[in-house]
Amino acid sequence: MKKDFYEILGISKNADAAEIKKAYRKSALKYHPDKNPGDKEAEENFKLAAEAYEVLSDPNKKAKYDQYGHQAFDGSGGFGGGHGGMNMDDIFSQFGDIFGGGFGGFGGGGGGPRRAKGSNLRIKVKLTLDEIANGVEKKVKVKRKVQAKGVTYKTCSTCNGQGQVMRVTNTILGRMQSASTCPTCGGSGQILDKRPSEADAQGMVVEDETVSIKIPAGVVDGMQLKVSNKGNDAPGNSVPGDLIVAIEELEHEFLKREGENIHFDLYISFPEAVLGVSKDIEAINGKVRIKLEEGIQSGKILRLKGKGIPSINGYGSGDLLVHVNVWTPKTLNKEQKQFFENALNDEHFIPSPEKSEKSFFEKVKDMFS
Ligand SMILES: [Zn+2]
């Protein structure tokens, strides 16, 4: 059952236009989303009030509503089936007409007078590959502008706290109103009243604050994270700006990151390649032991599944790719030299790649598929 429009605005059926407007203004102020951030019920009431006002402020619609109730608008393209016909933008633009630009939309930008927002602060955080792989909580010191102790603000008299001033011009279409940011208060609707001696012209002081930033695993160099409300304060009844955290990845001594995969160049000696060997290799979160079969070829890539960087979305991890490089000795003693000279025409030393041993190009193709 849909609630009665008069009930929503808390007025009687005999209310005149001025009373309706006043009642709407009152509930709009009370339920305004800026005053009730995240409160779904308030938003619902805010929409209901706007819908009620939309009908009751229009003499034709009001007459229909008085006679037929909500049925008057069912299926007629008006408010049939609820208040889906009005979105928040409609409501906010309606405000401008009713209250002379007394309200703005969400998120700033379009025509202000809402709680002013302080400026954003920016910092850079340098992370090691291990920190990126595991996620990390970083404590950073920031210098924030905050309202000084004992500072007070008063309503700006130029704009009556609206943050905007209306200019009325006469055109052939009639009187036109346009809004511009109040030159006295700069849009915040409030000006400094009592200024403590240490405060600046806006009543602000700079304070050191340690901010804790939770950085999820898998971030990428250049990525920006936002910590809400840890930027600068603004004067008056305002909300602080945000702290923007830019991620910088420090180069790892041995590991190379490529998206979610990590590459490691492993060098083994010629005898190790011939005889097979176990090696502790560098990996995220410490060393990993791998076993290389005897007769392993240079250029072989071993893939350690899941030993890379976790996906930032939380879907699995990349791999660690170990590139095997066989180190060819550059100098030999006499006996060694003799040994290899004897081996030159020995069948065991003649390259004979098997079909199953993929070429370098096939391996690269595999890695990216
Ligand atoms: Zn002002």
Image: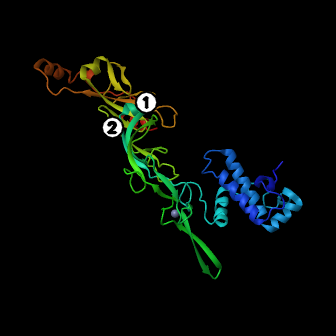
Residue topped by disc 2: 250
- Name the residue type under label 2: Leu
The answer to whether the residue labelled 2 contacts the one labelled 1, judged by CB atoms less than 8 Å apart, is: no
- Name the residue type under label 1: Asn
Relative image position of residue 89 (x, y in whole percent): 64, 59
Q: Which badge, 2 or 1, comes first in the chain's sequence?
A: 1
**Local secondary structure at mark 2:** loop
Q: CA distance from mark 2 to mark 1?
A: 15 Å
Foreground residue, 311 or 267?
311
Q: Is residue 40 left or right of residue 163?
A: right
Rendered position, 291 above or below 158: above
Q: Quadrant of residue 123?
A: top left
Q: Is residue 90 left or right of residue 64?
A: left
Relative image position of residue 68 (x, y in whole percent): 88, 59
Foreground residue, 58 or 20?
20
Q: Quadrant of residue 223?
A: top left
> Dot 1 surroundings within 10 Å: few (below 14), some, or many (20 or more)?
some
Q: Quadrant of residue 69?
A: bottom right
Foreground residue, 203 or 58?
203
**Local secondary structure at mark 1:** helix
Residue topped by disc 1: 134
Rendered position, 211 above or below 1: above
> Dot 2 surroundings within 10 Å: few (below 14), some, or many (20 or more)?
some
**In this figure, what is the number of numbered marks?**
2
Relative image position of residue 353 (x, y in whole percent): 34, 28
Q: Is mark 1 within 8 Å of ligand 1?
A: no
Q: Is residue 171 left or right of residue 64?
A: left
Q: Residue at x 55, y 65 (%)?
A: 159
Identify the residue at the far right of this view: 67
- Residue 176: tell me if it is visible: yes
Foreground residue, 123 or 136?
123
